[in-house]
Image: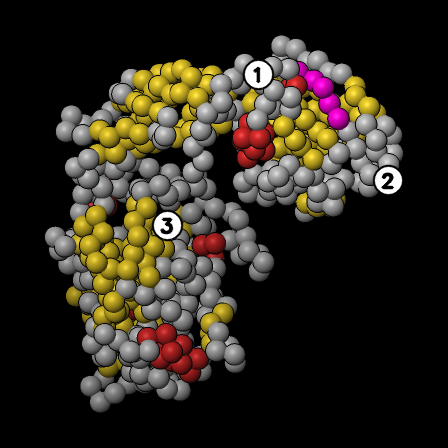
Amino acid sequence: MKKNISLICAAACAFSALPFAANAEGNDKVYGTMNIPYADFYSAEIENAYEVDAVSSATKARNENSLAKWQSNQTGSLDADGKWSGSGIVAGTYNDGNGNILGVTFPVEVNQADVEKLAAYDFKPLDSKPTAYKEVTFDGDKLNISKLVDTNGEQTAEGSATVSISTRYGDYQLNVKGYPENCDFYGVIVNTTAGDKYALRHLENIWRGGQISWSAGISTTEAHGNELKYDDYVSSMGKTVNSVTFITLDGYTTVNIGEQYLPVKFAGEVKAEDSASGTGKTSLSLTGFPDDYKKDISVGEGFTATDSEISYTDAKPGNYTVSVADTDGKYAPFSADFILTTADIPVKYDNGRLVKADSFTDDDAANYIKNLQTVEVNGTTYNLSGRGAVKVISEDGTIDFNAASNNGNVFDGSGNYNITLNATGYTTPYSFEIKKEEETTTAASTSNNSATSNNNTTSASNKNSGSSNSKADSPKTGVNGVAVPTAFLVLAGATAFTMRKKKD
């Protein structure tokens, strides 16, 4: 196993920031760096199994340096405090200036007589022999690139990985632990127990923190709308990955990750219809499943399911997930969400917090609060869950009148607020009014069908106060039940090659 990978690699990177000049040894070999297209870089590595294409990116998002992701190929370096920084997302790559990442800039060994032929590949000389490099030769005008020459010898490390088949970047995502840190990745190869090798490219396949992903032909568009190239990865379905090889300026480091099976995916669909909460049933549809898919269908406590129907007893309003798994483990699992609904509102506003409404239980109120999605305050809507959520209402229903979003305070301090709440599974918005130092506040439940409200009087001295007696306070029509809550060895010295780092 390789020792002190991160430390050694980082030290080499720090030294490699020095400028270099040409070096020709007695055998007329010259060392330098050149732009190597992905196809040539990987050709000998995967034994010409397939030609690795360039990466096209339509992503226009820019970082703090006004660079798009495909332009962020700046080198990383080791800071005085020992931390690696400055590496771009696609460090080590080169592009055509128009959104296409063409390959990597990597050390090579070439005959002195052939140096001029590399002008088109942006050849830049080094003043010493690098630790890892590729041999460049010519057959007439044809360029030949060798397998990586690793003067250290290939290193191995024991790591681990998890497989995700629910990824926005293709069909499979591997989160690898034990990968070499403080180094830039110039290539990554996924290895299977069957001897397959899958070459990956930056941005589309190689990402941050040991994360790698690819499409096998089912999910062919990633989160930003870029089309994913999948032809060369279709055969990965049903294979077992046992290691991942990282190519750096230190050479090869292969991380053993145990056996990670890639379940077979297919264009199937699971669909469950929304229905009323309480006790009842809803339809379930399973389409496109292979005949040998042995289905295990589940929702949760209080639910039973067949290929065509989900039945439930005393189910509270909210979002539920039906899952379909292959008991043999060959195929990928599927899932679908559905919502059980009610028009009832089981809460009311009282003296700065939401409490249970008349004829409802504490569990009913807690379920409503748990399912809150948005709050509108004086015409401005804030998300209460998910990305960018603002903590306006606590789990016990208390309203935080000091809550703030990125745009400022939610409440303006006036003490006069018109508030509307929306919760998943509750088809009727709940609206109420708070008036500063007034004895009267009103609350109402509104829906497409009807809205009723009554004003109650309560003491509100020196605080926001309110009470309600709306439709939410009327006897409920739903049925109470149980809700189903969802981390190279290198030749370090002043003459090392300037490394680039893709901070995963």
* Residue lying at 33% horizontally and 38% vertically, measured from the top left: 220
Residue at the spot of label 2 = 462
Read off the residue under disc 3: 204
Q: Specify whether 403 is left or right of 384.
A: right
Q: Which residues make up the magenta segment?
A: 467-471
Amino acid under disc 2: Asn
Secondary structure of the residue carrying tag 3 is loop
CA gap, disc 2 and disc 1? 34 Å
Between disc 2 and disc 3, the foreground one is 2
149 or 402, which is in the foreground?
A: 402
Q: How far from the left and from the top, in percent, is residue 263?
A: 22, 41
Tag 1 secondary structure: loop
Quadrant location of the C terminus? bottom left
- Check the image and report above or below for 158 versus 18: above
Closer to the chain start, of discs 2 and 3, is 3
Residue for badge 1: 476
Point out residue 278 in the picture as x, y percentages from the top left corner. Answer: 46, 19
| Residue shown at 24% from the left, 60% from the top | 257
- Amino acid type assigned to the residue bearing label 1 in the image: Lys
Determine the CA span between mark 2 and mark 3. 58 Å
Magenta stretch, main secondary structure class: loop
Residue extending farthest to the top is 449
